[in-house]
Amino acid sequence: MRNAIVEPVRFPFDAVLSSLTVCANLKPSLIIHGGAWNIPDEAVDDCRAGIRRALEAGWKVLSGAGTAMDAIEAAVVILEDDPTFDAGIGSHLNRDGRVQLDAIVMDGATLKAGAVAAVERVRNPIRLARSILEKSEHMMLVAAGAEKFAEENGVPLCAPEELVNERERMAWRRCLEDSHAAEHHVGHEHGTVGAVAIDRHGNLAAGTSTGGTCCKFPGRVGDSPLIGCGCYADAEAGGVSCTGHGEGIMKIVMAKMAIDLLHDQRVLVPHREKGGPLSLAQAVADACIRKLAHRAHTTGGLILLDRDGLPAAAFNTPRMAYGYVQPDASFRIAP
Ligand code: GLY
């Protein structure tokens, strides 16, 4: 059982309240994360810089003619290419010393997803996930089959070694020599990155990408690429991307739980005042993290946009790297 901090952490409250009351009809909207983990002080600047670059990339798309899907892809590619985060380059190594990557994107209009798991030769699995969404009748491909799809559909492959960085190789060696421990990974036990966006036409998309857990058994797949667990998007309710301990998130199907709560609360409480003391989006995010702690006894976080573009985030780890675009187009970045 992992150590769970039960009370979810929220946005800085005053700042959010003021933005929530004005941004009810904000479109486009963008929120991203770089994982909920025990981010040490010395990694905070790198996390913030990565989140900023990803927000810039996604927002550039949304400010132009790009779609929500283009925006989440652009933002997640930046995070996959940044070794600070557990996705793409710099991902944790599995027990055999190899990187195996998982990713998903989902379109809120059609409810179609594209997902990949356990790929070893794809530098940007979010691109492959999108290609599956757009070009395949299927929604999820794994391992060699996913890489074959990449080859046949123009998604570039790389050598597996290109995904391995020295920090993670050393952490893996320490785990082999000693025993697996979060300390060997500078507190970076889970990681995962993700993004949710709404474009000026109201299209909503969400995506999640991860290297999974360190020293995982080869072939292990966590929550991230599973529809409803690590990601969900429904234009009638909102979009979600999760981070944290995959085996726990799967138990409560956390992304779908968030979307169902958003949807049901809208239906059940139609006269609820928007921008009240706690936005519906924030109340939903908090409820999911409480459930993760109480029923799965573990840690994690999530970001979401409701269907109007209102952002929320919650986590029960010491810190979560995340950021969103405020109504005046400035970026709010944590930690
Ligand atoms: N949430 C990432 C994983 O458990 O694989």
Image (cartoon, grey):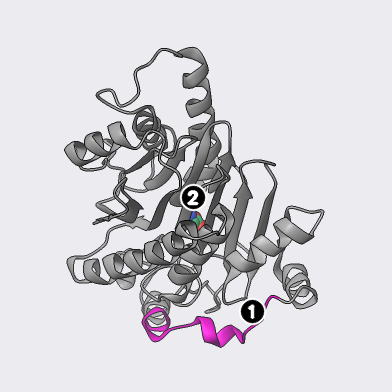
Label 2: which secondary element:
strand
Image coords of residue 171 (percent x, y): 37, 77
Instruction: Please say if 273 is above or below 3.
Output: above
Image coords of residue 215 (percent x, y): 48, 69
| Residue highlighted by disc 1 | 121
| Residue highlighted by disc 2 | 197
Frontmost residue, 8 versus 54: 54
Tell whether 112 sits left or right of 136.
left
Identity of the residue drawn at 36% across and 79% down: 174
Tell whether 145 sits left or right of 241.
right
Q: Which residues are magenta?
A: 155-170
Number of marks drawn: 2
Identity of the residue drawn at 52% across and 21% down: 264
Identity of the residue drawn at 35% across and 23% down: 274
Q: In this orientation, does residue 229 appear?
A: no
Answer with the quarter of the image where residue 18 lies: top left
Q: Badge 2: how crowded within 10 Å, few (<14), some, or many (20+)?
A: many
Image coords of residue 91 (percent x, y): 46, 72
Tell whether 323 sits left or right of 43.
right
Query: What type is the residue that disc 2 sits on?
Result: Ala
Earlier along the polypeptide chain: callout 1 or callout 2? 1
Query: What type is the residue that disc 1 sits on?
Result: Arg
Label 1: which secondary element:
loop
**Within the magenta stretch, is there residue 277?**
no
Identity of the residue drawn at 61% across and 42% down: 108
